[in-house]
Amino acid sequence: MMTKLRSYGPATLLLWVLVLIYLFPVAWFILSSFKPGSELFSLPLSILPENWTFSGYITAWNRFNFAQYFFNTGLVAVVTTVLTVFVSAMTGYALAKYKAKWLSIFFICILATTMLPTEVIMPSTFVVIRDLGLYNQLAGIIVPSIITATGIFMFRQYFKTVPDELLEAARIDGVGEIRAFFSIMLPLAKPIAVTLAIFSFQWRWNDYIWPLLVLNDPNRYTLQLALRSIVGADNIDWSVLLSASVISLVPMVILFFVFQKQIMNADMNSGLKD
Amino acid sequence: MAATTQTPEVATATPPRRRLASIRRGQTIAPLIFIAAAVVLFALFFVWPGALGLWYSFTDYRGVGDPEFIGVENYAALFQDATFYSVLGRTAFYTLLSVPLHFVISLGIAVLVTTRNAKGKVPARVVFFMPWLISPIVNGVIWRWLFGENFGFVNYLLSLVGVDAVPWQTDANLSLAVVLFASSWGGTAFNMLLFMAALKNIPRSYLEAAEIDGATGWQRFRHITLPLLAPTSFLVVLLTTIGSMKEFAMIQALNGGGPGTENMLMVQYIYRTGFERSEIGYASAASMVLMVILIVVAVIQLRFDKGSDQS
Amino acid sequence: MNPVLGRRQLMLGGIAGTAAVGLGLSACSDGAGSGGEGGEVTHMQFFLSGDANQGGGYAHMAAKYQEETGIEVEIVDVANEDLTTKLKNAALANDLPALARVGSIDATWKDVTMDLREILDTNDVKSELAAIDPDGKVLSLPSDITAVGMFLNKTLFDAAGATYPAVGEEPWTWDEFTETIRSVQTATGASYGMVMDRSAHRLKAFLYEFGSNTFELVDGAFETNENTKPALEYFYALNDDSFMPRSVWLSDGDPNGLFKSGDVVAYCSGSWQIADFAVNIADFEWVSVYMPKQPVRVTNYGNAASIVVFEGTGQEQAALDFVNWLYTPENYTELSETSGFLPAVNGITVTYADNAEAFELYNEEIEASDEVAARLKTQDLEGEIEGRTLEGDPLRDETVKYLNDEQDVDTTIANIIELLNASL
């Protein structure tokens, strides 16, 4: 019993001290969404609402069609995420497992996509989307988001850790390159695939600029656009903004809760041991 | 079962060169197929717009009308602007602080939420994940409430123990410190997830073998976990470096680059002196310079990556 | 070991790429089409921002219009920050809405707007706030007016037994104002005397009151008068972390939140705060009072936004009819009453349901304003038509540097003039 406490104690204590530090700002945010607007900035400072109210939630719920937004955003997020994971895995695999000068150069090129400020790229990208006939198409917000340097980089780093012997053995057995990837390598990369899926979901969930620019039907806008419209030119309705933000977090938190299990349950070792 | 007794160094070592060569033979088509989709998308959505940006950087383009070629005038003006250098210095300073901080915190937390020795890991993961979801504007109000100079929570706590108000907003370094706290807090989830997946990938048998040999927790971490994490560590360091050099949303939400312009970083400089004044040409030139700097940094860091997987 | 790409390999790559792109397309290209317009217009889009925040006046009027005419005006409420980009790109894609309520005229679409002259003349809209090009074409109409104004924490004033000029009395000077505020601070222990939004719009009102013409375009170059420097120095002295907290201007601190805390005596902001304060201040009483003068009585007022009708949408006439209907005295009054707007149409009487005194005070301040405010506003509108819109503001940005001791007042003024001239 004592040894158990000794081995669990310090790590658990440290973990929960950190949890409390991280939780504090989040708690202020969530609790404040239950404060009436008049309490948000009042002195003395208090983290707990004095008068609990749901008025921000009620206003937000009546004002925005959350079900519609969740559906729109969810649809785009799912399709984009599947494509992103697939393309990133293939590209990252090629960059990790094949040696050629042009592959190294292409990797630098991929990294470069994260290096320009969005404003430089955005106006011209819009013209590209228009010229490809993707304006006012859902594909117009999905296709440009498929490649991400982060995703490709993640898979590249991951496949580097997978021993080459595995691939060699497959080759000796006469398995083709493409099949080796799909039947041996891709299944091994499940934790990375799930991690990238979480990232991709979050990026799409919080994306606002492409849906706004590419789609002309406001019924197909996303949640973030609605949230941004709360912030006016000169003032912000904080109680509605905080409540609507809390609502918008819920699906992502649930998704994460489910997905993090997938990361932890993926049994990597079985693939590598033999 | 051979892997259980292998040392990690052997596991990550590349096969002998002779065999590598045989693998490579006839393997040119496969990688091409694998990267084909990425190449097409890269060409359409980066090269095409990026080339336009590069062209603008040599013109006096103001957003409308026809751009007129003016040679390297924008670049000359940029390199003559004293503000550019101070902004670059401040950005580098911020990056030097932010990268180690992000790295240590997220790795530490990733270890804690995956170790067998801690309780309540699942709720903890959710808590660490949530800050990443909060939008910049809400972050702005949260952190101002906490570190507001005039009516902030931290200063309120300090006043209870008799400490004078700390100028979190009007002192340049303290102001940057708040940005560092907030960005580490908000960015932990991203790096933590990367480390979690990598930690999961470390064969438990290595650690168990070392434990049987009497290695302490720290020794196991230092000599087994850390070397095996090298590819992910490199990923985190490079992405955080690029992210920090391009930090914008968080600064904008917290202090607008203040006090004054003392914490103005690169991207904000590009917006302020370029886009906000409709000087698209100048902004494009500054962006290209930023990209070149970042590519140089990335290439230098890539050398370390090569080193780590060939040792 | 052959690094040269064969033709077959390239082709294969191309096919794989196209397949990936095609996948995205086919997976989700359905349902994108918007209802086709042909013949009679029964539906049009009206882009604006902030309607829901301001009582939903436009949505209300659109519903009324549909009831009367059967034509649906769809209100698309886009975030203020995104509206400019949205319209720019819609113009590029030849997909502009029928009409919009915009913050400023944008060069990308200014040549595809309809002339609103007839609506302006028929309904006596304030023409000094309309964007009119040298040929007399009216590009935009003011949708409503906002003005800079002063709010006081009345509870603190009452506790200190201090007074402020009532409606109808002579406004106070900045010297009297600061003296009174300081006395309230001393008597009540309030932490700060005043906060002011970090905005050139508010600072301009301050400068006008000191007799400055801010920065005026004369014979092709910007210049300012001798009153600007002392005014900026006065403002610098107010930012002393005792009368005004420096964090607001230096680091983008939140003045609205600071005033709501109840620990600040005065807040220099504007008419748009009235609705917010009415709901979100419960701990103390607040009041709108005259802006101080030193010696010029003036506030900085202007169009909150402007209405434009786009050309080439196939719905021009329908949109013009709607705007004309909207600006008739009866309908415009209803809109102003619903949204709490200060009217941009002459000669109408708006009866505000809440905070009527505050709104009336603003209307009185606008009436009494020195002509400098209207003159400079016209200059801004002319600038918009010529395509020199600045998103950032040299006046604000350079003043912030001055307040942070990064440069002296003379450099500040010189820099502002240089930056403004560079935009010509």
Image: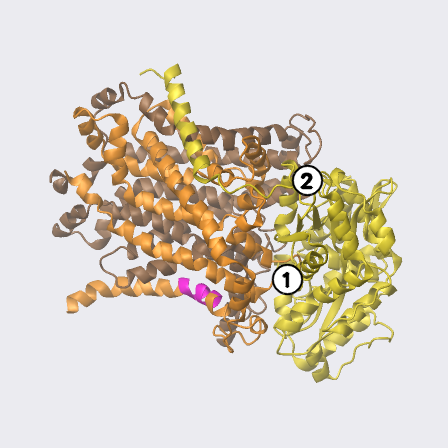
Chain colours: A orange, B brown, C yellow
At which x and y percent is residue B205? 16, 47
The one of C280 and C123 positioned closer to us in this rendering: C123
Name the quadrant containing residue C344: bottom right
Q: Is residue C291 magenta?
A: no
Question: Is residue A221 among the parts visible in the rendering?
Answer: no
> Is C263 or A217 nearer to us in this picture?
A217
Residue C118 drawn at (x, y percent)? 85, 48
Image point 60% across, 64% down: which residue?
A: A237
- Which residue is located at x 21 percent, y 54 percent? B217
Query: Which span of residues is magenta-colored?
Result: A22-29
Amino acid type shown at disc 2: Ser
* Quarter that holds the C terminus of chain A: top left
- Residue occupied by mark 2: B278
Left or right relative to B85: residue A250: left
Instruction: Output the chain of dot 1.
Output: C
- Kindly identify which numbered label has been placed on residue C53: 1
